[in-house]
Amino acid sequence: MKTHQPRKRFGQHFLTDSAVIDDIVRCIDPRPGQPLVEIGPGLGAMTDPVVARCGRLTVIELDRDLAARLRRRAELEVIEADVLTVDFTRLAAEKGARLRVIGNLPYNISSPILFHLLGHVDAVEDQHFMLQKEVVRRIAAAPGSRDYGRLSVMLQWRYDVEDLLDVPPEAFEPPPQVDSAIVRMTPLAQPPRLDAGLLSELVASAFSQRRKLLRHSLGRWLEARGQAQDFDLQRRAEEVPVAEYVALAQQLSAG
């Protein structure tokens, strides 16, 4: 079979370290009958051991050559598409259960993929992803840390986030120029009720000038909306816990 050459435009770095693969699959713990969906299966490094445990797997692959290879396997359902166009809610309805989503995400579009999945969070049981280590740190960051930012707030308000393990560049072929990590994201069973679009807007405003006090960013945003909320603006955006951003969004919606 012709060797597949990694394509830069798809951000392809194929996982080859068997020990790392075993660790990842152990974290995922796939079981027979579970509706698992893998984003970007590539050459099947995670696909093979996952299928060995669960029997069947749905894979989403944009690269048509790789998709053609994957279709030769009867135990795989292949969706040849850009993951950003996939309707995970409809897919879960077809499966009759919430999805377990896994994958080594292309690092150049990892954030758009995470936000796309956020729009389908009610259709997801859990997510296990390989991401750039820096991105995982940002997703899991606590208030007051250097990594805490918009990505932290917008994902933590809806998911429980666990930074599971680090993966070095030499575990891939070709090796990426960054360290990687595995993250588990589990949707909260009872998320707060709020206008997600409003939360996104106010959090984006808060972090738009993160070196300045919030009165210069979020304060002006609130003034422009004619809102005078009892909210401490004498802090920087990274000092405010997720729960306070959520509470502010709820107050604004109620008002």
Image: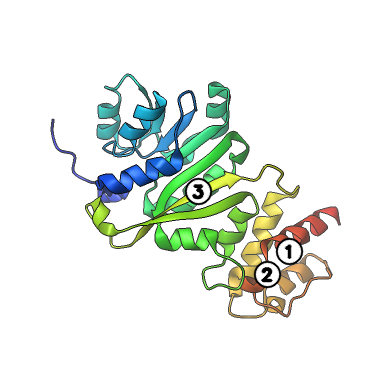
Residue 79 appears in the rendering: no
Q: Report the front residue among 227 and 37.
A: 37
Nearer mark to the viewer, of 1 and 3: 3
Mark-to-mark CA distance, 2 and 1: 6 Å
Q: Residue at x 37, y 33 (%)?
A: 50
N-terminal-most mark, 2 or 3: 3
Residue under numbered circle 1: 244
Quadrant of the frame with the N terminus: top left
Apparent side of residue 185 relative to residue 250 in the rendered image (left or right):
left
Task: Mark 2 and mark 3 in contact? Answer it, CB < 8 Å.
Answer: no
The location of residue 224, given as percent across then percent down, is: 76, 68
**Mark 1 surroundings: few (<14), some (14-19) or many (≥20) residues within 10 A:** few
Q: Secondary structure at mark 2?
A: loop
Q: Report the front residue among 173 and 198.
A: 173
**Quadrant of the rendered image containing residue 208:** bottom right
> Residue 240 — which label?
2
Apparent side of residue 171 relative to residue 158 in the rendered image (left or right):
left
Mark-to-mark CA distance, 2 and 3: 24 Å
Quadrant of the frame with the C terminus: bottom right
Residue under numbered circle 3: 184
User: What's the amino acid at mark 1?
Assistant: Glu
Q: Report the front residue among 185 and 214.
A: 185
User: What's the amino acid at mark 2?
Assistant: Val
Q: Residue at x 14, y 38 (%)?
A: 3
Nearer mark to the viewer, of 2 and 3: 3
In this view, the residue farthest toward the top is 74
